Amino acid sequence: KNIIVAIDGYSSCGKSTLAKALAKKLHYIYVDSGAMYRAVALYFLRNNIDTHDHAQIEDALKNIHLNFHSRDYETHITLNGEEVSEEIRMMPVSEKVSEVSALKEVRREMVKQQQRMGESKNIVMDGRDIGTAVFPDAPIKIFMTADPAVRAQRRYDEIHHKNPDLTLEDIFENIAHRDYQDTTREESPLIRAKDALILDNTNLTPDEQLHFALDKVEK
Ligand code: C5P
């Protein structure tokens, strides 16, 4: 049977860095589930979808076609054929995504697509509900946390060259806001699966994190 590694945790905890490194090492497929919610949020923004209107939401979901094509373990995602990998990392999407991802209809559809991706291949998937809702039977689950100030600084270092007007404060607020929404929403909120191993990486290098994860996989 194929193997699933589920990595969940708060925003900007380094989930994707670890997931990518692990996938590369194990020759598994890497799936960034957050990119899917981000692409849906981008569609909602562009098309002014009213998140209180169920018919509009259902309709939008029918019109959204997402596709992953991984090149060198980087996430490349298309929304209806258009490459949106960069745009989904920008602030407007980051500010909208938690609202959109809290919608039942959206989650139901994304979870279905994610489960399909894990049907026959070995994958590492990162997100918020992978070990709880998407793959509750995954043999390896990791729950990542890190100090919020450290997370904000890391995200700032990663994106400020592309968004020079962004301050560390803006990023800190966005992270805090998403954590709040993600942990308090009704539909599969972000929580640690009972059988997930906690990885607090505040003081760990990427290499140390990779070794922690590899050690679990090999057992
Ligand atoms: O992982 P990333 O920070 O890119 O995810 C963006 C947002 O997508 C999260 O803040 C969360 O609201 C949503 N998300 C989710 N479930 C997942 C992955 C992401 O609700 N499995």
Image: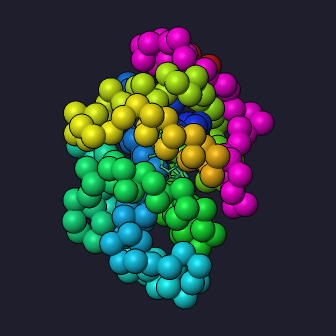
- Name the residue: 45% across, 78% down: 49
| Depicted 20 relative to depicted 67: above or below | above
Q: Position of residue 169 (x, y in %)?
A: 45, 34
Horizontal side of 163 relative to 126 (left or right) equals left
Compared to residue 137, the image places residue 77 above or below, namely: below
In-image side of 136 versus 211 (left or right): right
Q: Is residue 63 above or below residue 107?
A: below
Could you tell me residue 83's position as x and y percent? 22, 59
The answer to whether residue 49 is magenta is no
Total marks in image? 0
**Residue at left offset 66%, top offset 25%:** 198
Q: Position of residue 199 (x, y in %)?
A: 61, 22
- Residue 89 visible in the current orientation: yes
Range drawn in magenta? 183-212
Image point (36%, 78%), residue name: 47
Of residue 124 and residue 184, the one placed in the foreground of this image is 184
